[in-house]
């Protein structure tokens, strides 16, 4: 297990610093940037799934039934704690009437 850098901010600092500024500062550290790039992409997908589900006013249980999986799996997907197969991403896109686009840049 990788050691993660713990960052403690005082309450005053939290109020004064917006998230993007905070992130920019933290990403100056190469190890933090590597970890962010690795995990950040997964979180972006997780956040999109959460937003689509909420927009449709759909519960995790209903989404799980449509995906033929368990509610706990949907919760892990939305929290970024689940790796996604291409097959699952296609199913998710289908449930929300979306097209899945994967590209290499």
Image (cartoon, grey):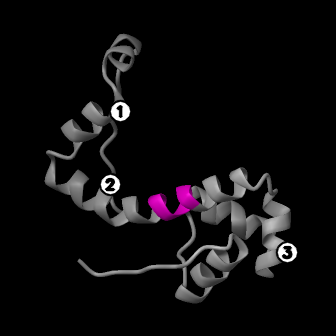
Q: How far separated are the C-alphas under marks 1 and 2? A: 22 Å
Name the residue that disc number 3 marks.
Answer: 65
Q: Earlier in the sequence, mark 3 or mark 2?
A: 2
Vertical position of residue 18 compared to residue 67: above or below: above
Q: Is residue 1 visible?
A: no
Rate crowding at label 2 as few (under 14), some (14 to 19) or many (20 or more) other CA atoms within 10 Å: few
Q: Please give the name of the residue rendered at 23% of the width and 77% of the height, measured from the top-left corner.
A: 105
Q: Please give the name of the residue rendered at 71% of the width and 66% of the height, measured from the top-left corner.
A: 74
Q: Residue furthest bottom?
A: 87
Disc number for residue 39: none
Which one is in front, 101 or 11? 101
The span shown in magenta is: 43-48
Disc number for residue 19: 1
Residue 15: image quadrant is top left
**On the rendered image, what quadrant is the N terminus found in?**
bottom left
Q: Please give the name of the residue rendered at 80% of the width and 82% of the height, measured from the top-left corner.
A: 68
Q: How far separated are the C-alphas under marks 1 and 3? A: 35 Å
């Amino acid at each position: 297990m990788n050691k993660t850098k713990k960052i403690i901010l005082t309450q005053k600092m939290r109020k004064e610093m917006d998230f993007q500024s905070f992130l920019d500062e933290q990403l100056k550290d190469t190890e933090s940037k590597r970890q962010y790039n690795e995990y950040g992409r997964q979180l972006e997908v997780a956040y999109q799934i959460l937003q689509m589900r909420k927009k449709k006013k759909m519960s995790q249980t209903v989404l799980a039934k449509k995906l033929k999986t368990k509610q706990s799996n949907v919760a892990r997907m939305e929290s970024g704690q689940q790796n996604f197969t291409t097959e699952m991403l296609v199913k998710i896109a289908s449930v929300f009437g979306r097209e899945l686009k994967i590209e290499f840049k």
